[in-house]
Amino acid sequence: MYDIYSCNYRDSARFILGKSASNPLYVIGLNPSTANREKADTTVAKVAEVARRNGYEGFVMANLYPLRATDPHDLPVEHNARLSRSNLVEIVDSFGDQPPVMWAAWGVNISIRPYLLKFCIKLNREVVSRGGRWLHYGKLCQHGHPRHPSRLSYLWSFAEFDMTGYLGSLVHVGQRRAK
């Protein structure tokens, strides 16, 4: 079903999944659930349809953390640094030569683990250094978080996402909480 697929040895962590194309849409969720090379889950099915309806011949689904969990609250409190590094390498290597078009799609749960925001900052540096841009789909959620694809309407549209402003506001809130 999907010709782009990278996971760890036991498939307990998925780095990227998608369909090859000359103009792919890169989608960054929070963490993978059950989709694999042979079958979609609700999120990936909706991502594929949104990409198709918006003129993208393919897509690459990746996440801020690659460990599979159907509930993001089940993610570990401490991240695995090696797993995070591998995730970043896999995502960046998938960009190819074209500046990536990134769909920010992680929802409000980015705040449940500090390492998710840290990874988002690292990924944004890579995207910006390659001339990429960020989009969000539909209205933003509370506190400016981009919506998760599992809860979308096909009637919505893409809009530019101010990733720098978004990350700055999250870092600022985190610093206030630390005091």
Image (cartoon, helix red, strand yellow):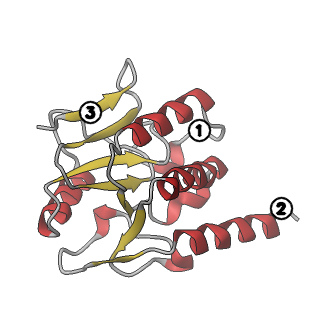
Residue in front for this viewpoint, 40 or 164 = 164
Which residue lies under the disc numbered 1? 76
Tell me the amino acid under the disc marked 2: Ala
Label 2, secondary structure: give it: helix
The answer to whether 31 is drawn above or below residue 117 in the figure is above
| Mark 3 closeness class: few <14, some 14–19, many ≥20 residues within 10 Å | some
Q: Residue at x 49, y 48 (%)?
A: 64
Which residue lies under the disc numbered 3? 5
Which residue lies under the disc numbered 2? 178
Report the side of 36 relative to 137 (left or right). left
Q: Earlier in the sequence, mark 3 or mark 1?
A: 3
Location of residue 5 (image quadrant):
top left
Report the side of 177 relative to 144 (left or right). right
Tell me the amino acid under the disc marked 1: Pro
The answer to whether 8 is drawn above or below residue 128 in the figure is above
Tag in front: 2 or 1: 2
The x and y percentages for residue 39 are 16, 39
